[in-house]
Amino acid sequence: MDTRELFARLIQCEAGGEGDAGMRGVATVIGNRANITYGEFARINGGGDFRAVIEQRGQFTCMRETVGGRYNPQNVYNMTPTQEHYDIADWAIAGGRLAGVDHSLFFHNPYNPTCPTYFPTRVGVIHNRINDHCFYIPTSYYANT
């Protein structure tokens, strides 16, 4: 599977029910991780490698076929992206970024009406919420990752 296909599947899997803005928000985070020049993601991204970011171990539940020792049916291998998912992947790869998500490097669905102030490891602070996803910009802790 090529990078575009993998990215479209990840967008569908992680945010398919979140509408255009939610999917673009998730794609923006991945684009930001692929292009950041410092911290953990800079060491992973190889200067713009979206696939390396998507495949980074432990980052996306949708990249795992098992979670907690059980089969995870919501994984990229079970997704069938539509043209919308490919268009959003193409948009992000071409440098598109969703206003309001800005420089966010993390997203999280808290399954709660409020977003925690900090991303679980304090490497991000809340920036915005789009539908069910909370988006976090990096803190000074991220720079040291």
Image (cartoon, rainbow, N blue to C red):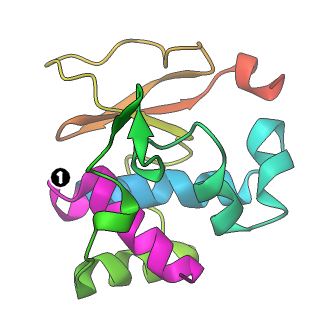
Magenta region, main secondary structure: helix
Q: Nearer the viewer, residue 100 or 35?
A: 35
Residue drawn where x is 27% and y is 77% of the image:
81
When asked about the image quadrant of residue 108, the answer is: top left
Instruction: Please indicate whether residue 22 sits to the left or right of residue 48 in the image.
Output: left
Within 10 Å of disc 1 (Cα), the crowding (few <14, some 14-19, many 20+) is some
Q: Nearer the viewer, residue 11 or 34?
A: 11
Residue 127's place in the image compared with 99, above or below, is above
Does 5 appear in magenta?
yes
Magenta residues, start to end: 1-21
Which part of the image, by quadrant, shows the C terminus?
top right
Residue drawn where x is 73% and y is 17% of the image:
141
Residue identifier under label 1: 18
Residue 94's place in the image compared with 30, above or below, is below
When asked about the image quadrant of residue 83, the answer is: bottom left
Residue drawn where x is 15% and y is 60% of the image:
19
